[in-house]
Amino acid sequence: MKNNEDIQRINSLIDLYFDASASLAEERELRRLLAATSVRSPKIDEARAVMGLMAEERKQSRRSRILPWRIAAGVAASMAVVLMLGVGLMSKGGDHSQAFDNRCIAYTGMAEISDAADVMSLFDDQLRMIDDAARAVETDIAGQLSVLAEISTL
């Protein structure tokens, strides 16, 4: 893309973009044209930088909205594993003294883990994940509350 008409189109779209009057279709066209051209100029480089920054901001914004749900799902899955281990140990029928015969068995995916050290390591990892997730949720909530406090003082 080196002909003069294409460069003129890019420059006119850049002007519209920076004037905040470009439509979504024009913004998409500008992104496509900027990606396709090898022409370098201060105006084109600035538009690339600004549009790249805006795209990264949108991506980060989406991640921050999704992250608490991923943490909650991880916490729920970890808690389910811990509960299944506990219920499995406690639900052995009859004499409960046999429920604690020093055997450790865990099921993860389609595999059975019967080595006590591996089971305890898995258990510790799950507890660590729960703790990390709880801390992350706590930090996120604290951050959101501080933003709300700042807004309410305006």
Image (cartoon, rainbow, N blue to C red):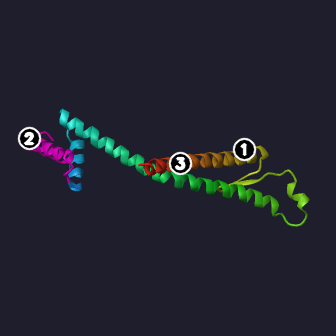
Q: Secondary structure at mark 2?
A: helix
The image quadrant of residue 109 is bottom right
First along the sequence among labels 2 and 3: 2
First along the sequence among labels 3 and 1: 1
First along the sequence among labels 2 and 1: 2
- Between 127 and 34, the one lying in front of the other is 127
Mark 3 and mark 1: span between their CA atoms?
28 Å
Q: Secondary structure at mark 3?
A: helix
Query: Which secondary structure is most common in the magenta stretch?
Result: helix
Disc 3 marks which residue? 140
Mark 2 and mark 1: span between their CA atoms?
66 Å
Residue 146 x/y as whole percent: 50, 47
Q: Residue at x 77, y 60 (%)?
A: 88
> Are circles 2 and 1 on residues that touch, CB within 8 Å?
no
Q: Is residue 40 visible?
A: no
User: Across the whole image, how many numbered discs are drawn on residues?
Assistant: 3
Task: Give residue 91's mark.
Answer: none
- Between 27 and 116, the one lying in front of the other is 27
Q: Residue at x 79, y 51 (%)?
A: 104
- In the rendered view of the protein, which quadrant contains the N terminus? top left
Residue that protrudes farthest toward the bottom in the picture: 94
Residue 60 x/y as whole percent: 41, 46
Disc 2 marks which residue? 4
Query: The magenta stretch spans which residues?
Result: 1-22
Disc 1 crowd, CA 10 A, few/some/many (<14, 14-19, 20+): few
Q: Amino acid at mark 3?
A: Asp
Task: Give residue 121's mark.
Answer: 1
- Between 34 and 111, the one lying in front of the other is 34
In the displayed structure image, the side of residue 53 where residue 87 appears, left or right: right
Residue 51 x/y as whole percent: 28, 43
In the displayed structure image, the side of residue 141 where residue 51 appears, left or right: left
Question: Which mark lies nearer to you, 3 or 1?
Answer: 3
